[in-house]
Image (cartoon, helix red, strand yellow):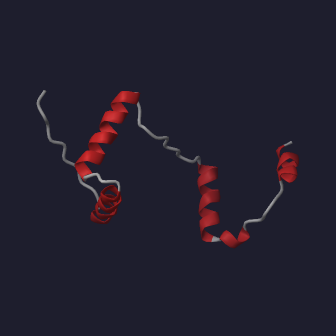
Amino acid sequence: MSDTVIRTRIDIHVKEKANKLFEKMGLSMSEALRLFIYQSVAENALPFRINIPNVATAEVLSEIRQHPERLEKTSLEQLEKDWE
């Protein structure tokens, strides 16, 4: 089996944060990427879920980020009533 080289571009700040994270785990960037690729092949999918919110959810999330003070606490009972 021969090795091959994979090259990619990424924001320098993201790379630095990833390097620090992987170092804490005892991994190099190459080892972490290799693990990701091997696990993806083993699962025949990405080894984690990617959730893309729909337009309505994205708008609500944006509103919450901009105005977290507008969030209201509620009870499970109230959620059940609202659901019905």
Question: What is the residue that sits farthest to the left in this orientation?
Answer: 2
**Of residues 26 and 61, the one drawn nearer to the viewer in this rendering:** 26
Image point (86%, 42%), residue name: 84
Q: Position of residue 20 (x, y in %)?
A: 32, 62
**Above or below 80: residue 2:** above
Indicate left or right for 60 with 48 as reference.
Answer: right
**Quarter residue 1 falls in:** top left
Q: Nearer the viewer, residue 23 or 76?
A: 23
- Where residue 61 sits: x, y (%)? 61, 59
Residue visible at 25% across and 52% down?
Answer: 28
- Residue 55 x, y percent position in the rendering: 59, 50
At 36% across and 28% down in the image, what residue appears? 42
Question: In this rendering, is residue 76 above or below 6?
Answer: below
Outermost residue, front side: 26
* Percent coordinates x, y for residue 27 in the rendering: 28, 51
Q: Quadrant of residue 47?
A: top left
Q: Nearer the viewer, residue 28 or 11?
A: 28
Total marks placed: 0
Name the side, left or right, on which 66 lies relative to 11: right
What residue is at 77 percent from the left and 65 percent from the top?
Answer: 72
Judge from the rendering whether residue 68 lies leftward or rightward of residue 45; answer left or right.
right
Q: Is residue 78 left or right of residue 26?
A: right
